[in-house]
Amino acid sequence: WRPAQGAGVLAVAATFMAGHGIGHLVDIAEGCAAAPGGTVTDWLGVIFPGVVTAALCGWSLRFRQT
């Protein structure tokens, strides 16, 4: 209910999730993934949640007062 107070926690989560998603994207680009172009698990289970977490973090940072 108070997005400005959750910004710090979301920033930590978004940093981890972005790094994890980038690792999966690198694996996909190098052809190390189980299937060409990555698996559904890569896209829906790792990369998409990372993007959503980063978007929520950006959204919550708009409400912070300096």
Image (cartoon, rainbow, N blue to C red):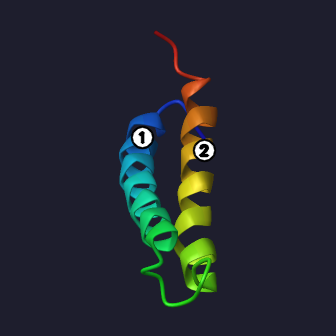
Query: Secondary structure beneath disc 2?
Result: helix
The one of 19 and 36 positioned closer to us in this rendering: 36
Which label is found at residue 50? none
Using a 10 Å C-alpha cutoff, classify the residue at mark 2 as few (fewer than 14 neighbours), some (14 to 19) or many (20 or more).
Answer: some
Can you say whether 56 is above or below 37 in the image?
above
Which label is found at residue 56? 2
Q: Classify residue 43 as left or right of residue 31.
A: right
Q: Amino acid at mark 1?
A: Ala
**Residue 10 screen position, x and y as percent:** 45, 45
Using a 10 Å C-alpha cutoff, classify the residue at mark 1 as few (fewer than 14 neighbours), some (14 to 19) or many (20 or more).
Answer: some
Residue 12 placement: quadrant: top left
Query: Secondary structure beneath disc 1?
Result: helix
The reply to whether dot 1 and dot 2 touch (C-beta < 8 Å) is no
Question: Residue at position x 62%, y 64% from top?
Answer: 48
Q: Classify residue 16 as left or right of residue 37.
A: left
The one of 47 and 53 positioned closer to us in this rendering: 47
Q: Earlier in the sequence, mark 1 or mark 2?
A: 1
Q: Amino acid at mark 2?
A: Leu
**Residue 43 screen position, x and y as percent:** 61, 73
Q: Residue furthest front?
A: 30
Q: CA distance from mark 1 to mark 2?
A: 9 Å
**Residue 49 screen position, x and y as percent:** 57, 63
Question: Residue at position x 57%, y 89% from top?
Answer: 35
Can you say whether 56 is above or below 32 in the image?
above
**Residue 1 screen position, x and y as percent:** 61, 42
Residue designated by label 1: 11
Q: Residue furthest bottom?
A: 34
Q: Classify residue 13 as left or right of residue 59.
A: left
